Amino acid sequence: MEIAKALSHSAEILIMDEPSATLTLQEVERLFEIILELKKQGLGIIYISHRLEEIDQIADRVLVLRDGTCISTNAVDDVDRNQLIELMVGRKLENEFPARTKQLGEEVLSVSDLNRKPKVRDVSFSLHRGEVLGITGLVGAGRTETARLIFGADPLDSGTIRLYGNEVRIRSPREAVRHGICLLTEDRKSQGLVLNRSVVENFALPNLEGFSRFGLLSLSREMIRYKDFAASLNIRAARPGLPISNLSGGNQQKVVLAKWLARDTEIIIFDEPTRGIDIGAKFEIYLLINELAARGKAIILISSELPEILGMSDRILIMHKGRITGEITDMETATQTEIMQLAIA
Amino acid sequence: MSNKQSHRFTAVFNDYGMLGVLLLLCVYFSWVTLDDQHPNGESGGSQLAETITDQFDSGTTVLIIARKTKEDTEFTKALQFGLEARGLTVVEVVQGQPRDARRALTKVAESGTSLDLIACNQATLQWSFFENIQEKFPQFQGLKLLAPKSYRWPNFMKLDNLLNIANQIVVIAVIAIGMTLVIITAGIDLSVGSLIAFSAVVSTLLIRETAGAEEAGAMGMILCCIAAILACGIIGGFSGAMITWFSIPPFIVTLGMMLVASGFAYIIADGQSIYQVPESFNRLGIGADFAGIPNAVLVMIFLYLAAHILMSRTALGRYIYAVGGNKEAARLSGIPVKAVILLVYTISGLLAGFGGIIMASQLKSGAPTYGVMYELYVIAAVVVGGTSLHGGEGRVFGTLIGAFIIAVIQNGMNLTNVESYTQKVVLGFVILGAVLLDNLKKKKWSTG
């Protein structure tokens, strides 16, 4: 539609900014056909994307930008994927996913027969200290809904949640946070952030008790704490007092991370933590997840990107139509095909 | 302008833009109401005494002529005291009509004493009787007429008028604090006007029935007022409960409660006004126990300071902004969203109840007809003050400025004799203009 609109102005140069972000796979293929057609007609097209596989597929030349400066321009055939990533991140990458040693501790969370029909049916699993548990499946398989049940965002039809072996009832996110669970939602704009409030306010939102003395907030303590996290997570916000809507997607996501890390909960649920952010920020988030696991946190990682799930998890649960249809524990031999078969079973 | 400077500029404009508008309005109304001011009363009297003793020797004889008003009495007293303290002779002080002045002058003339000066104020100086006074009484050689010097000063800027504005706005301003909190949570409270009437009726009725009517003591009155305020808080809390637990839109819930509260006020008062309260009941609304500032205005200032601290320096304030900015994100951040909403409507109810007490105190009675249309003035003050109806943004001091803008426009139009029908039209456009300005400002800065 948008493309049709642009063409009706008989343009000679077409700029597309992440055009595939909201499209399905088939639609993306259709989009590429249109682009090739336009190319034949002699249009110049600038295609902005953070999806490297798209670049390989569609582009003739590729230009890498980092921190507002042009890093390189190459013909697509001259650079491979890893070189591109290195150019984008600005350092040598051994691996797309940082390595980590697995150290499982005691059982922290166990859920049995969680039900919220029709989205979640009889879901049971357990989670250990120091573990990254990947949950994947097709969109709509009930992954996010399961996370919301554990976080108290939606009411349970039936089922039990145990923390350290004790049964708990979690009726609201507030109670979940008190029990040491946090959820980094998949859609940060509508669920993770209050966009018209400042960066610092968003950061402080779940942590205000810690900044209060006799009921009054200490703005300086709040700012010091924010600056700690901004430095360690490399958040780029020139003026943290301005609305968070001014920040880029990656930096917004880091503020969401920071606000929960400051809360220091034992169980952290990441729901699509790398969606819509560039590859440099992605890598930083992977490093962070590993560091958290190494510090003994229990982590659930929900993702649709199979390489990410395979690269990051210690164990993978696959969901389909609200049920857990498979579990992969041997990460050495696991493949994307194996996961896909379970996901559409 | 560098980026940093322009940011500072926008921040300053955001914070103080409406304050600038208020100041411009004050300057404008000062300019159009610039007028000759004639000192009277105590200050006029002592000023004239000083002028006379500067120009005339002791031993000069003076006749003071003024009207029979309270202000004129103060004038004559101060004048007589000032003159006699410096050795001048006040022959007589006359207070009354021109014929009283004639009688006094004739008497002085017959007694044969000399008379050098007649001291008047602006009102008596203009009596036609004083025209050609030397010809009428030739026996007083070199008789002179003197009145306090007049000066140019805007009627708008007179202390009395400024206090008048503050008194007029205090009810609206107090209620607007609660309304600001409600609107920041992206809600609205239409019931506050009716709660004014409800609170005024309940408090005065309780004073009449339980605290001893006109003989009620201070403690009894305070308890009755607190009971009325609490009743309004409960009504506000009920609105909040309907909004949170049954997900009815705030507009509908508070519209319903507006009718309910108004109806209750009529039923309880039996449709009548209630006057049976002690004299001292208007101490809150009219009395001024500290530095000449009305008590109600002092309470208002205190409430604004408290609300400012609440909104900027407490967790609850942050919660209120977050709930209005993004309810779901707030809930998923562990904020007790329902409790916050319940609380802001309760606060709005309590403050509306307190506003009703102030109004009852100012008028020394309670009637179910109070507060009609007040909810709209209150909302207008909040919106003119820069709080967004979309929620998540706004400041209580902005609301105070908004309330003053409305009051200043009304007062200025009264002083310049604008008809009350025209006033409504102007006020309506001012509200539209304020919102338009706010929108334009935001649009420009978000894209530019």
Image (spheres, coloured by chain):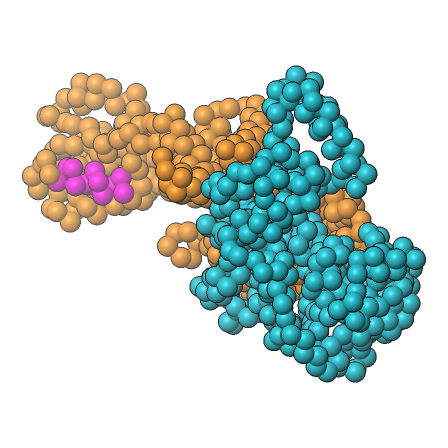
Chain colours: A cyan, B orange
The percent position of residue A330, horizontal first and vertical second, equals: 79, 71
Looking at the image, residue B359 lies above or below residue B113: below
Classify the position of the C terminus of chain A by image quarter: bottom right
Q: Is residue B50 magenta?
A: yes
- Image position, residue A278 (x, y; %): 60, 49
Note whether residue B307 is visible.
no
Q: Residue at x 19, y 46 (%)?
A: B82
In the foreground, B123 or B116:
B123
Answer yes or no: is residue A253 visible.
Answer: yes
Left or right, residue A217 beside residue B208: left
Q: Is residue A270 above or below residue B402?
A: below
x, y percent for residue B380:
59, 38
**Magenta-highlighted stretch: main secondary structure?**
helix
**B22 or B309: nearer the viewer:** B309
User: Would you identify the image quadrant in which residue A291 lies?
Assistant: bottom right
Name the foreground residue: B176 vs A14: A14
Q: Position of residue B126 (x, y in %)?
A: 30, 24
The part of the chain drawn in magenta is B43-53
Q: Residue at x 49, y 43 (%)?
A: A71
Question: Taking A333 as reference, is B119 left or right?
Answer: left
